[in-house]
Image: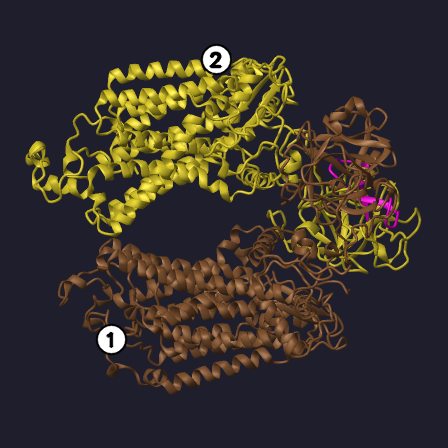
Amino acid sequence: MASTPGLRGRRVRSGAGPSSAVDFDQDDDHNSLYSNHSRHRSSIEQFLDSEQASIAMVGVLTALAFALRFYKINNPDEVVFDEVHFGKFASHYIQREYYFDVHPPLAKLLFGLAGWFVGFDGQFQFENIGDSYTENHVPYVGMRALPAILGSLTVPIVYAIMKESGYSTIVAAFSACIVLFDNAHVAQSRLILLDATLIFFMSLTIYSYIRFRKLRYLEFSSEWWTWLIATGVFMACTWASKVNGILTVVAIGIAVLVDLWDILDIRKGHSMEHFWRHFSARATGLILIPLIVYLTTFYIHFAVLNTSGPGDTFMSPAFQETLKGNELLLNSQEIRYFDTVTIRHKNTKVFLHSHWERYPLKYDDGRISSQGQQVTGYGHADTNNEWQIIPTKALPETGRGRVVRYNDVVQLLHVNTQSYLLTHDVASPLMATNQEFTTWPKEDVVSRYNDTLFQLHLIDAYEGEAWKSKSGHFRLVHVPTKVSMWTYVNQLPEWAFKQQEINGNKNAQEKTATWYVDEILSDETGLDPRGRTGEVPAKQPKKMNFFKKFAELQLLMLQHNAGLTASHPYASSPINWPFLLTGISFWTQGEDQKQIYLIGNLVGWWACVVALSIYVGIIGADLLARRRGITPIPEPVRNRLWNNTGFFIVIWAVHYFPFFLMSRQLFIHHYLPSHLASALVAGAVLSFVMSETINYPISIRGPLMDRPRHPQEADLGINGPIVVGLFTLMMFAMFMYIAPLTYGTPGLTGEQVNSKRLLSSWTLHFAAKASGES
Amino acid sequence: MAASVRVRRPPSPPPHAPSQHSNRFPHTREDHLDADARREAASKGYSRSTLSRKAYPSGGLKVTSGEWKLLAVVIIIALGVRLFRISKPDSVVFDEVHFGKFASKYIKTQYFVDVHPPLAKLLITLAGFIFGYDGNFDFKDIGKTYENVPYVAMRLLPALLGVATIPLSYLTLRALDCRATTALLASSLLTFENGLITQSRHILLDSPLVFFTALTTFFWTGFSNEEHHQPFTQSWWTWLTLTGLSLGAVVSCKWVGLFTIATVGLGTVRQLWLLLGDLRVGPRLWIKHFLARALCLIAVPTIFYMSMFWIHFAILQNSGEGDGFMSSEFQHTLGGRGMADTFADVAIGSEVTIRHVNTQGGYLHSHPHNYPGGSQQQQVTLYPHRDTNNDWRIVNATAEGDPDFDWEEQPLTYIPSGSRIKLRHLLTQKHLHSHDYRPPVSDVDFQNEISAYGMPGFAGDANDDWYLELESDSYGRGRGDRESGKRLRTLRSVFRLRHALTGCYLFSHKVKLPEWGYEQQEVTCNKNAVKENSLWFVETNIHPKLPKDAPKVNYKLPGFLGKFLELQQVMWTTNAGLTDRHTYDSRPDSWPRLRRGINFWVKDHRQIYLMGNPTVWWLSSVAVVLYAGVRAFLILRAKRGYRDFENTKVSKYDGLCGFLFIGWFLHYFPFFLMGRQLFLHHYFPALYFAVLLLASVFDLLTSNLRPKIRLQIAAVLIFAAFWNFTYFSPLVYGNPWTKTKCLNARWFKTWDFAWYVGSFVE
């Protein structure tokens, strides 16, 4: 996948090469038949290709991009859609409070930086969509300016990608216009959202990789290294902006593998040593350096967020203790035998609870219980939640020997009913596969002594580690039957007051069977135990290895990302995206009937879909024709089509198809990176359809280029500007037509809303009713 | 695939050395042909040396009479292994709960819905039917003792198909040009595979599935051989058609059969691609190749599959517990569910019953019980059965303050779209009502409660008013006509009801009310209503002023195609909905490692536990990995200029193993993409390919050895498999076992057949 005529196509050995031994690059295999010299070039093309024209074009595009993205950027002065989240995260950075999110930190750090720069104090919490910024004195325009700037800069980068790939100026402008006049890109860039940053870095990655590939005849030169490393750095930034950025890494990875595969080819005449040199260069530039950049963003993230905040509870106790003012840090204490404690389930937050009522003899499904005392999970504080820890070994009178430790075998005495916690081989009320938990009276404990023994498995602990309240997460494993005390969100019937079932899970290693001691209520003598350890109250945050912190957070991010499966009214399935069937309602305001509805430019998106299908058609026809021995497309054009446009197609596919496998909530803005790639494809296809000429060769000449090329230049003639001009006009018209939905202003009457509803599947607000007087 | 494996030459001839070939096999047979005949032969795309038609066995299957005897012995052993004490246990085992029950339903012709296509179930039913099963056993729980059920006959069907798989594996390998020893090895390993044995001894669908997969593979191999020999002969057509029929059968057993279709499809595409690159094959001939395959491998299986459903519908003519999955139209095709014709024209004052379109929840219903929370007014629900509490009267709401717009006196007034109406519940004289209370279960902002409110004689308030919005005609199933898009008509019009004051839509979804609502379906008023769930239609209609001979309507009964397509959709959604965890489910990555089995049955200190034969299982997995590794290495070598693939031996075994590897891969990998419950037995079709691959790897590794030594190695492997089989056989047959032996057999903690402490005697 190269920016230039590449290495893939079928070789047609001319045999006429001066050095046939090194005649490995079929780029050379064309003859003057394909070349057309500049003297045949139309004057309009010559003019457009001049440097001044190109600069002017970039200038116009960039200016327009800034204008469209900054137009009324202060409107609405209310929290819109996911600004709820990303705005809040920015304020957490400014307040330095730890928070948890599924996305890597770079883009959010930039928002935090922007907010800090424009003087945001972080007090405003972005609680609800529609909260006013002006009333709360939030300098939101400065924060929105960041994605708007990055989104605007994406447009000239798209232009540059196409230009570097050897397409005519007008074709490059065409691709840039698809992004420039796209309502979805504009709407997404004007708000405090991550996608503009993601797309900006993604386009920079593509650009750098193309520059890198164009230097392949000057391998290992300093320029070559520069662009290789630039690719790696931008790739890491893409990934660090949003979790979908990993797809960019995959896309570049595929291109690099294809490239390496070609270098490996014996017919290239490279030695294995040479191959390994290439391999290690790419490993450094595209694996090692990006990893360092990615980790650095997390390093900064942890360094900034050093105070306790809403994200604490997601993390492990060890992690939490590194945060200033964390509850665990302040209140965690060693537990001693005969302490009375409350025990809480980590996931569902219910207390281990028991009361005098007994299990019914017979359940509805006909199974029989032990009729023992009920043990349930209860959500609220209650004296029935109190348990005393009873030792099973001899204790010293005083001192550290009385501390409960990892792997100790204990009994738990329910204080109010004076009975011991017990489990046995009787099916639990709701799950026939799990064991029932009950209690056994203290007086009669001898008869069931063994069944009341539980071993304490502290999580991630070492032998002999002390058991602590709050931070000492543990599993309680029953000694005789090896089941683990477990609970899950399922209510028992009326006879247990709809409390949560607690049972014994046969998988003793079950992750969700984790509990912790919430509070130490009193010690053996009934005194309040606080301060018995005599430690200084103001504890210093503990240190934790950065890599451990990173690994923990990264794992949690992956788990939570997969867990975002709740339905959302504007979530849509990927098949709808390229056709623009549904959008997202970002914001509405009732009085003036204003709304922001994320939807793309219908002309642009459908043109992209058409271009993609034309591309598939061309490639299919080319394959079939070649199979039958016909070569319909000239070699340089074909190479460009396969390698360069193929690279764009890979980017499009890699950023699109994986979503089909994801079961999480999906939104149309997940398609925006793919849309950008499809805009690139659209340009390439337009160029192919309009003319069989391209700028060739475009790789930088170097010592490895063994033969002089027969250059040719792209020439679309007068048709190019006319077609592109007309198309741009249509795009602009469509853009303006939908603009009220993009900018959220002006308000629309019901009839206007109906007329803007171009596809019946768009769910706009304030539509006039077809019938009735409402 | 099976391509290019027929050449047998000495391994690795030195490059560019003059080949012995032409001397040993001179092209004498072609010498007598004239140039035209030779050109014709070439244009068909087969090599010159295969011109000889003499002694070409059908499907390329050269099996000597001695081998047939050998095969007979193998079959007898397989019969012994599979049928041993098949009548034990005499109680329900594992999924016999389902598939036995389905057989009962077939015999009693009661409609049911299952996620699997009908063929295997029909076969099992047939076996039961022939042996006089009356369908009266309920197969309720695992371990329930059989009474008056010819369960042995029903179990015999999968068992015999399981036995038939063994000779198929032998013949397939022979057709793939492996040695007899290799074929014997594969068939013996499959014979002693505990998992396949356990699975085929009970009333389960996987044994038929594996059998038809094996059958398809065999036919396809035969077809590929014919294709190499000469296309478009009579026997070429026979093998091709048989492949198609067998494909239809696989996919009619379980949808997993689609993977077999993918395997054959990939092979077909490859053949067509090679033909396309052969410039001697003209476009006309190529299209003939294409059409022949399209006919036999697409049309034939489709027709087969659909005819299975035709039989399915033909048998299940009566209403049963599967009704609730189907649409109202479908339900009315079932016996006992029919409905008399009803008046077509709905007018102000009509007594109607109203049904929900999208869920099978039933009729808009109200009964004299109140909501325990919210407004504490009378409940409104969806109720699936006919009942007088489903009757509502449509009352005009435009006449302000007029409690009884005089529909009895006034001329008949039809109800156009946009009418403002009230719905009065006939028995309680209350109106369908909505207000700003949250519904009892779906307690969210955008939903309002629906209740019945009012009292006899009370005209109702504005919260009882609804706008009728007719959907433009022919929504969904093409039920409407032009007229019913404009005014309300029974069965033909589909409409939404918009609450006049709050603008929310009358809505229902698959959410059940708790016990106080008799577990009927919740009805709410939804401001963000999904359109499909807010559509309703009138099912019955009576109006006193309508003359007796007024036009009547009834459901438009769906034809076979409509029923077929609807059932496919229901099966698909049900299948995708099977996401609950099961105690013995497993993820695909654990299968090739044989990490854990499935507990089938435990009773009286005996246990049946589905577990593979570790020797066979692990060796086959090793073979798969070995092939993949070696193949990757060879590709790398080729890239660096080594010419391994020009070696005939490499190319022969690459074609052979490649085919089997792709078969394994396509029957295994797609499971990773599935979110539903998966079990170890889903691996069996892939295991079949893996064992064949193991055998061909054996064939390759022993190709330089003397036949005697090869046979000895095979014997050792077979013996190892046999020993391992007997070692675990108590779990297969539910034989008595001692606790010590059982605990010794637990080589890994994850093999949890002894968790049930005390299931074996001490």
Q: As rendered, which of B358 and B262 lies closer to the eye? A: B262
Q: Considering the image in quadrants, where does the C terminus of chain B appear? A: top right
- The disc numbered 1 marks a residue on which chain? A
Q: Considering the image in quadrants, where does the N terminus of chain B appear? A: top left
Left or right of residue A641, residue A90 in this image: right
Chain that the image shows in brown: A
What mark, if any, has residue A711 been given in the picture? 1
For the point 60% across and 77% down, the residue is: A145
What mark, if any, has residue B544 been given in the picture? none
Q: Secondary structure at mark 2?
A: loop
Left or right of residue B289, residue A70 in this image: right
* Chain B tint as drawn: yellow
- Residue kind at label 2, given as amino acid type: Phe
Q: Position of residue B356 (x, y in %)?
A: 71, 45
- Residue kind at label 1, given as amino acid type: Pro
Q: How many marks?
A: 2
Q: Which residue is mark 2?
A: B84
Quadrant of res B261: top left
Q: Report if residue B378 lies within the magenta region.
A: yes
Crowding at dot 2, Cα within 10 Å, few <14 / some 14-19 / many 20+, comes out as few
Query: Residues in magenta?
Result: B371-394
Q: Position of residue B637 (x, y in %)?
A: 26, 48
Left or right of residue A153, residue A341 in this image: right
Mark 2–mark 1 distance (CA, rounded to whole Å): 80 Å
Crowding at dot 1, Cα within 10 Å, few <14 / some 14-19 / many 20+, comes out as some
Q: As rendered, which of A7 and A211 lies closer to the eye? A: A211
